[in-house]
Amino acid sequence: MINTGVAILAVVLLIVRFKFNPAVSLVIGSAYLGLTAGLGTEKTIETITKGFGDIMAEVGLLIAFGVLMGAMLQQTGAIQRLVGALLKVFGPNRMPYAMSLTVATLLQSIFLDVLLVIAAPLARNLAAKIGKRGTARMATALAIGGECGIVLTVPGVGALALAGLLGVPLGKMLLFGVLLVIPTVAIAVAVMCFLFDRGWWNEERDEQPFLGEEPVPGTGEPAADSGHAEHAAVADRGAAASTEPGSGVVGTRTSAATRSETPLPVLLAPLLTALVLIALGAVLDVAEVHNPVIEFLSAPVIALLIGLVGTSFVGRYAVGAEAMQRSIATGFKESGQILILTGVGGSLAATIAATGLGKILGEYFTASTAAPLLMVWVIAAILHVAVGSVTISAITAAGILGPVAPALGIDPVLIALAAGAGSLFAVHVTSNTFWLLQSLLGQTTRGTLKTCSVGVSVASVVAILLILPLSALL
């Protein structure tokens, strides 16, 4: 137990204090733990590589397919149009709830930084329509919806990684994740809106003019200033042509024209089909209904592949083949880092499991599931405060407590959800999400601490409070 604590502390110090790459730090921590716990050199190396390979076998293709699908949807302009449709249906006052729930559930195949950059201009426009405290409400909605979706909702990269690490069937993770994320997001947004309405938001001190709202000559659209160039570049990679009227393939209609002509349900249909297939497979599995065709189509890899291929065909029609190729290139760049971090997180988890820590920890807990679930939540929260990465803290915490689950009869999906919930606590200045929300929504640092840090922390606490009674039913 001491060696495990030292290994985790070393990983945190290497990342935070010495600015080592997180992937390198996790491998160093795994090697230290294996050698000091008596696995020996050969067993340590074998465990590290096997842990990496095992989790890649579980979720590697899923993460890649999900990120690629998200890049294609971003290229087609489906997200902007979806938010516009939500505004028409729900109106300005209900938009914080509609926006946060949509981001947390339907849009998790999109890389979070890209999603925030896409959604921020829409959120600013909605904030103006909401009126007083509109910026606070929309910033909180984006922060809570985006962060919760990463680790609680399939195909969020954190949720995929946690499911693969703990051996949770993806359909089950999807069902329980959606059941948890919807009330969590709704309650957290309601709590924050209540606080804002009671005077906790000061426009003069918590907001600042958005620096990138000087119009581009001839377009009337706001342009990012030099201080925001790095954030705009996130969305521009592989997408610049799709936002210009003449970016389609030569000889075809312009992307702007085809976007307006392609119905939004058609653009989103492949993604929704993939999620429905995964959920259908989970429901039939619980009902013990077996059909070879449905089992094949509902397998997560096949379902997401169907969604990816369908999105590709729809995207080619909407913006042209050339634009789709650019989006695929962008998706491959984004998925590489995610895959490596997920894999080395699996290496550390495998090393911890190989040392027998699960058996040791199992002796310290009773048959109650509350203590282990609270422990995994606390560990994930502490790691996130120190490291600043939701995905890394969730994977590491789940890997530590995962071995306890069989000994106590805890359903692994609860460990996954508790780790995800804990990793949401205190999103702060070490997180890129924090600074994206600060700069793109016209908030001061003080305001962002309220909307992002406090808002997502409220969601973290709400989630674990909902998970604990859920554990009594499983």
Image (tube, rainbow, N blue to C red):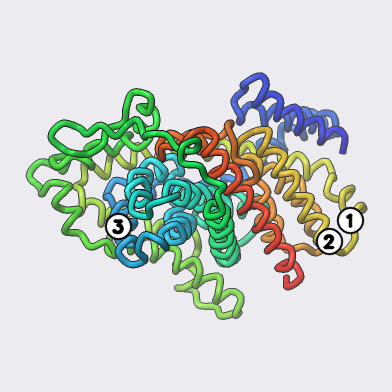
Task: Identify whether 84 is placed above or below 207.
Answer: below
Q: Secondary structure at mark 3?
A: helix
Q: CA distance from mark 3 to mark 1?
A: 50 Å
Coordinates of residue 21 in the picture (x, y in percent)? 59, 25
Cβ–Cβ under 8 Å for marks 3 and 1: no
Label 3, residues with CA under 10 Å away: few <14, some 14-19, many ≥20:
few
Q: Give the residue drawn at x 84%, y 59%.
A: 407
Instruction: Tell me which amino acid carries mark 2.
Output: Leu
Coordinates of residue 39 in the picture (x, y in percent)? 83, 34
Q: Secondary structure at mark 1?
A: loop
Q: Which corner quadrant holds the N terminus?
A: top right
Q: Earlier in the sequence, mark 2 or mark 1?
A: 1
Q: Give the residue drawn at x 61%, y 35%.
A: 388
Q: Is residue 61 visible?
A: no
Return the residue at label 2. Answer: 408
Coordinates of residue 223 in the picture (x, y in percent)? 27, 33
Coordinates of residue 337 in the picture (x, y in percent)? 50, 35
Return the residue at label 3. Answer: 84
Task: Identify whether 151 is placed above or below 440.
Answer: below
Q: Is residue 178 left or right of residue 326?
A: right
Q: Is residue 271 left or right of residue 163?
A: left
Return the residue at label 1. Answer: 365
Outermost residue, right direction?
363
